């Protein structure tokens, strides 16, 4: 996949694409924009580099069962929006990650499969306390050691 990305976008990435958003737009991995009278309507993704887009989409479909951040992103999005939109979402994330890795010359550090649960942990605790208090319970919380 890395060879495919490099062959399509080239080695001088910062000169051609000033930001990750420009690269994703050029590849056609951004949502279409169809808005009229203040209402957003669903639309297809824009046309872009068909070779890069199809390769990234195929890679996104293959990552769905993996135990990492991208696999969790795929499963989370697929549950809400379906498999095809989840694949485009993960392909977009993969291309953004690739852009930042190439421009910053860093190694990839995975956020982990439980990234989304950690992100919402405090929200879930506060929400659960409020619900229990509305039901008439007194709640005290102590953190497990």
Image (cartoon, rainbow, N blue to C red):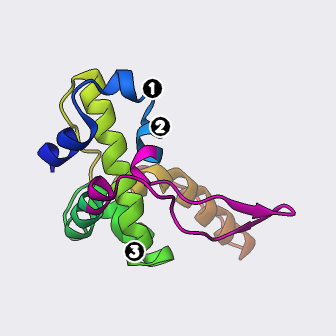
User: Can I make out residue 12 in this image?
Assistant: yes
Q: Secondary structure at mark 3?
A: helix
Of pointers 3 and 2, the one earlier in the residue sequence: 2
Q: Is residue 62 above or below residue 20?
A: below
Residue at (87%, 63%) from the top-left corner? 37
Q: Is residue 44 above or below residue 32?
A: below
Mark 3 residue crowding within 10 angstroms, few (<14) / some (14–19) / many (20+): some
For residue 84, which numbered disc appears in the image? Answer: 3
**Could you give the CA–CA distance between mark 3 and mark 2, rounded to whole angstroms?**
22 Å
Does 48 appear in magenta? Answer: yes
Mark 1 residue crowding within 10 angstroms, few (<14) / some (14–19) / many (20+): few
Q: Which residues are magenta?
A: 26-54
**CB-based contact (under 8 Å), mark 1 and mark 2:** yes
Q: Quadrant of residue 69?
A: bottom left
83, 134: nearer the viewer = 83
Residue at (31%, 40%) from the top-left corner? 97
Q: Quadrant of residue 100?
A: top left
Residue pointed to by mark 1:
18
Q: Secondary structure at mark 1?
A: loop
Relative side of 101 to 46, left or right: left
Relative side of 81 to 36, left or right: left
Q: Nearer the viewer, mark 1 or mark 3?
A: 1
Residue pointed to by mark 2:
22
Residue at (74%, 71%) from the top-left corner? 134
Residue at (29%, 45%) from the top-left corner? 111
Does 51 appear in magenta? Answer: yes
Relative side of 120 to 95, left or right: right
């Amino acid at each position: 996949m890395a060879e495919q990305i490099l062959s399509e976008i080239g080695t001088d990435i910062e000169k051609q694409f000033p930001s990750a958003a420009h690269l994703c737009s050029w590849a056609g991995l951004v949502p279409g924009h169809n808005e009229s009278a203040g209402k957003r309507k669903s639309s297809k993704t824009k046309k872009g580099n068909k070779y890069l887009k199809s390769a990234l989409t195929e890679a996104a479909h293959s990552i769905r069962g993996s135990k990492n951040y991208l696999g969790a992103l795929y499963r989370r999005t697929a549950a809400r929006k379906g498999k095809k939109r989840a694949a485009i979402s993960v392909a977009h994330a993969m291309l953004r990650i690739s852009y930042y890795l190439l421009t910053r010359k860093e190694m990839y550090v995975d956020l982990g499969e439980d990234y989304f649960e950690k992100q919402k942990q405090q929200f879930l605790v506060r929400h659960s306390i409020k619900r229990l208090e509305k039901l008439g319970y007194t709640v005290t919380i102590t953190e497990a050691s």
